[in-house]
Image (spheres, rainbow, N blue to C red):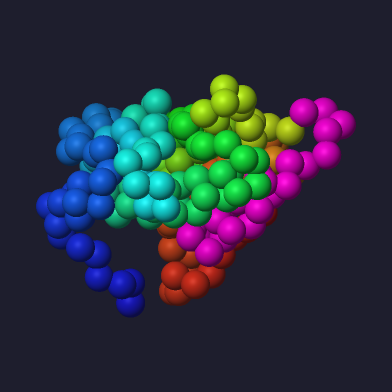
Amino acid sequence: MAPSQPEPGTCLTELKAAGFDIETAEQPSSSNESCRIEAPVRLKAVPVPSRPGTTVRLAAQPVLACRFAGQFGHWIGDLVAPVIAGSLNTELKSVQTGPGFECRNRNGAATGKLSAHAEGLAIDIAAFEFANGSLLRVKPDPGAAPDQALATLRTAACGWFTTILGPGSDEAHHDHLHVDILQHGSSDRYRICQ
């Protein structure tokens, strides 16, 4: 049995109280009735609890299911920002993402199962932007050694999300990091970390 989810209004209230810059979003229109988000929200920025008053922006302001926005936002503020500050000696300013919700099948295939994006339970991350103006792109430069901070964040994401796909996992994820909380099978403990 899946863990009980907070009521949609409670989720939004809790995230606002935690310092998230978040607002209710309209249900995205789609010709496919299966593409629906439970409690859609627009995520604009998340707090960094270890640095009071500091936030990390999401320039794309992705539309996500509220419960996923909370999980994703806490990952950024509680894990990503401190790892960046500690390992790269700069502050995380923003995260470059896709739109969150997309009514499509997995890997953009013409047929098959719907993607977690179709329920607002996934997001694609292209890059991390730092306060010093530099950018850490998920897509590796040809011939460059893997970035240790990025490798650490990718490995740690396996504790926060049920699916993590990125460069090296398959061609569909060669230039971004996909994270989602879609349950695989009967347990929320099963992870796909590639």
Split into 4 quadrants, where in the image is the C terminus? bottom right
Looking at the image, which is closer to me, 183 or 150?
150
Q: Residue at x 31, y 72 (%)?
A: 3
Tell me which segment is drawn in magenta: 141-164
Where 164 falls versus 57 (above or below)? below
Q: Residue at x 34, y 47 (%)?
A: 52
Q: Is residue 36 visible?
A: no
Where 89 falls versus 155 (above or below)? above
Where 156 falls versus 72 (above or below)? below
Q: Quadrant of residue 59?
A: top left
- Name the outermost residue toward the bottom: 1
Q: Is 84 covered by the magenta stretch?
A: no
Q: Which residue is drawn at 32% across and 41% down?
A: 53
- x and y percentages locating residue 160 in the rendered image: 48, 60
Q: Is 159 covered by the magenta stretch?
A: yes
Looking at the image, which is closer to me, 64 or 92?
92
Where 126 falls versus 80 (above or below)? above
- x and y percentages locating residue 11 in the rendered image: 20, 55
- Name the outermost residue toward the top: 133
